[in-house]
């Protein structure tokens, strides 16, 4: 509780400082992000665009993959198989994000370069792929929990009507567990949005508004890392800018999380 | 073998024994299928397709894990040796080691536990056992859930301002541990509350019935019963702290350290940061060193997680209600 107030207070005070020198109009209106060299420009969109690219790519892999694993665990996996896969997913979820960064840089990128020769050394695609793998276990286990919460009797009513496993699953179980499933998607997106290390290592640090995933980009988080690991004097405008970026990051993830929780609450089907 | 003696008709009686002939069953199935309408055909096909899609997703996820571990092992296994663990980082990849980082990680984790566990468990006990169900409490509930979803780098920025600048801890082990404590507090609180919730009300009522105060009940009955569950949550959250990089990077943990930190105010580095630095270098030799560092880190994490699973199993065996 105090922590929340602390986070908001710290970020807010520095953000206000930042906006004293850089107008909000420029922050949201300009499309160039060049904080390091003259002429300095603070248009946030390239960073947001880079983050969006990573998030979308990660979602594209993590969400269907996670849902697939969740469905498999629920509908098909024998108890033995389940007892084998669940811990594996937990390991996958427990691997530190730096390790994923290493994986992206030394395994995924060379593979991509072999398939698509104009891939840059740092590229959004490999970062998006590993972030997708990273959020997959989370989606899988949350979907699995949501699907398990659907009472057996509801499913069996479906089977009694002669429905196939696919029909019961997609037309009965999934709709009944939809609130939990969507919430898991949103949490995955919010996690991908705030992901730092893998993105910093694999996606490079070129703020650029592009939709080409083979190019190097910069995200909100990797900009913060770039500034804080360089020798930026405290009180300078770059230093303050990371707090404005952090504020944006916090606001967006909080919005996502609240959306997820309210969804779970509102659409939770209650079974007697 | 026809059914001439008994009253109960068997399969062989109904189907004239045709099921006993090998191959007949499959043939019958094909005959039945031939009469299917396109809609039925599609239903059968879609069911199979559904199975294979979800199976593929699972296989791919597991394959990704195995591939990841295998590629790390292939690169780094040769580099892991006793001298790798006991030497300091170096400009020469072949000589670099993880001694400073390993000690830094150990100290940081111990210090984080010392700060976060009492506060976290205390908060959980208060919320679960003492606090009345008020609007404020519900607000705190939502707040804690939200805090668990805040990106770790934002905690790093908070730590940078609060501990490094305002409290003037400098870029020290203590500042790092305090930041990490903030990060894992919500996890510890949630896990401890879950553990406390599983203790049946009857235990508390029995203690109250004997005239125990609320505090006596919690201390003598509820906490000891919930302890394994709480410990599991604590260990898992600490293993998260061991693997976390971004907030410490913000705090300014060093990347090159040729000594082991001795007091909480010393500068420090941790394994993930060391790995980050080696990975970020362009030379391939350092990537090998990074892989070796990853092996050490994963081994550490697996040990910690195995400990948590072991405790969970013991707990499940001992629970009697």
Image (cartoon, rainbow, N blue to C red):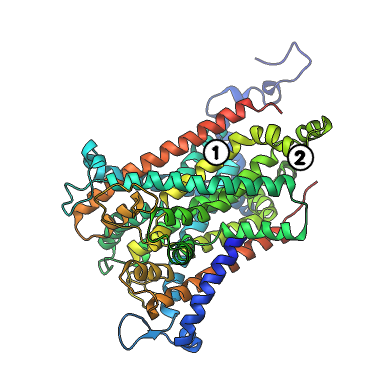
In the shown orientation, is residue A183 left or right of residue B6?
A: left
Q: Residue A251's quadrant in the figure?
A: bottom right
- Label 2 neighbourhood size at 10 Å, few (<14), some (14-19), many (20+)? few
Residue B194 place in picture, x, y as percent: 65, 44
Residue under pointer 1:
B232
Residue B152 place in picture, x, y as percent: 47, 60
In front: B211, or B120?
B211
The residue sitting at the top extreme is: B5
In front: A165, or A231?
A231
- Label 1 neighbourhood size at 10 Å, few (<14), some (14-19), many (20+)? many
Task: Return the chain for callout 2.
Answer: B
Tell how many labels: 2
Residue occupying the point 33% across, 69% down: A214
Residue B265 place in picture, x, y as percent: 38, 54
Residue under pointer 2:
B214
In the shown orientation, is residue A36 left or right of residue B282?
A: right
């Amino acid at each position: 509780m105090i922590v929340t107030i602390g986070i908001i207070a710290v970020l807010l005070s520095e953000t206000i400082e930042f906006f004293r020198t850089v107008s909000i109009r420029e922050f949201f209106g300009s499309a160039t992000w060049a904080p390091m060299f003259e002429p300095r420009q603070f248009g946030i969109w390239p960073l947001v665009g880079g983050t969006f690219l990573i998030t979308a790519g990660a979602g594209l892999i993590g969400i269907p993959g996670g849902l697939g694993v969740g469905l498999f665990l629920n509908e098909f996996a024998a108890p033995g198989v389940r007892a084998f896969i669940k811990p594996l997913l937990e390991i996958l979820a427990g691997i530190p994000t730096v390790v994923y960064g290493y994986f992206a840089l030394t395994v995924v990128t060379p593979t991509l370069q072999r398939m698509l020769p104009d891939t840059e050394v740092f590229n959004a695609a490999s970062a998006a792929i590993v972030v997708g793998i990273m959020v997959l276990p989370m989606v899988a286990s949350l979907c699995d929990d949501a699907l398990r919460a659907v009472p057996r009797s509801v499913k069996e009513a479906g089977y009694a009507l002669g429905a196939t496993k696919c029909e019961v699953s997609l037309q009965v179980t999934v709709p009944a567990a939809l609130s939990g499933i969507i919430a898991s998607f949103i949490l995955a997106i919010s996690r991908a949005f705030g992901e730092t290390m893998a993105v910093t290592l694999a996606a490079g640090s070129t703020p650029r508004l592009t939709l080409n995933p083979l190019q190097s980009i910069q995200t909100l988080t990797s900009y913060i890392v770039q500034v804080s690991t360089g020798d930026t004097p405290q009180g300078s405008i770059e230093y303050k800018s990371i707090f404005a970026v952090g504020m944006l990051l916090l606001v967006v993830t909080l919005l996502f999380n609240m959306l997820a929780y309210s969804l779970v609450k509102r659409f939770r089907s209650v079974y007697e | 073998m026809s059914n001439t003696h008994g009253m109960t008709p068997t399969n062989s009686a109904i189907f004239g024994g045709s099921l006993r002939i090998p191959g007949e069953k499959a043939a019958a199935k094909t005959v039945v299928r031939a009469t299917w309408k396109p809609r039925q055909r599609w239903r059968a096909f879609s069911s199979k397709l559904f199975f294979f899609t979800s199976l593929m997703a699972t296989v791919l996820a597991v394959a990704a894990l195995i591939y990841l571990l295998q590629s790390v092992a292939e690169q780094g296994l040769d580099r892991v040796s006793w001298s790798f663990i006991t030497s300091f980082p170096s400009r020469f990849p072949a000589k670099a080691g993880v001694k400073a980082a390993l000690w830094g990680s150990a100290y940081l984790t111990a210090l984080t536990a010392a700060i976060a566990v009492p506060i976290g468990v205390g908060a959980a006990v208060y919320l679960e056992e003492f606090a009345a169900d008020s609007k404020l409490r519900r607000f705190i509930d939502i707040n804690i859930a939200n805090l668990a979803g805040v990106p770790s780098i934002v905690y790093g920025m908070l730590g940078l301002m609060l501990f490094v600048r305002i409290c003037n801890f400098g870029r020290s082990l203590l500042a790092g541990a305090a930041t990490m404590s903030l990060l894992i507090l919500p996890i510890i609180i949630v896990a401890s509350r879950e553990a406390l919730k599983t203790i049946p009300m009857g235990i508390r009522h029995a203690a109250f019935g004997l005239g125990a105060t609320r505090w006596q009940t919690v201390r003598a009955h509820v906490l000891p019963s919930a302890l394994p569950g709480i410990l599991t949550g604590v260990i898992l959250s600490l293993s998260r702290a061991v693997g976390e990089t971004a907030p410490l990077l913000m705090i300014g943990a060093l990347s090159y350290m040729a000594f082991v930190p001795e007091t909480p105010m010393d500068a420090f580095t941790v394994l993930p940061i060391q790995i980050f630095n080696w990975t970020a270098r362009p030379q391939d030799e350092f990537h090998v060193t990074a892989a070796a560092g990853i092996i050490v880190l994963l081994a550490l994490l697996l040990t910690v997680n195995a400990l948590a699973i072991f405790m969970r199993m013991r707990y499940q065996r001992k629970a009697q209600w």
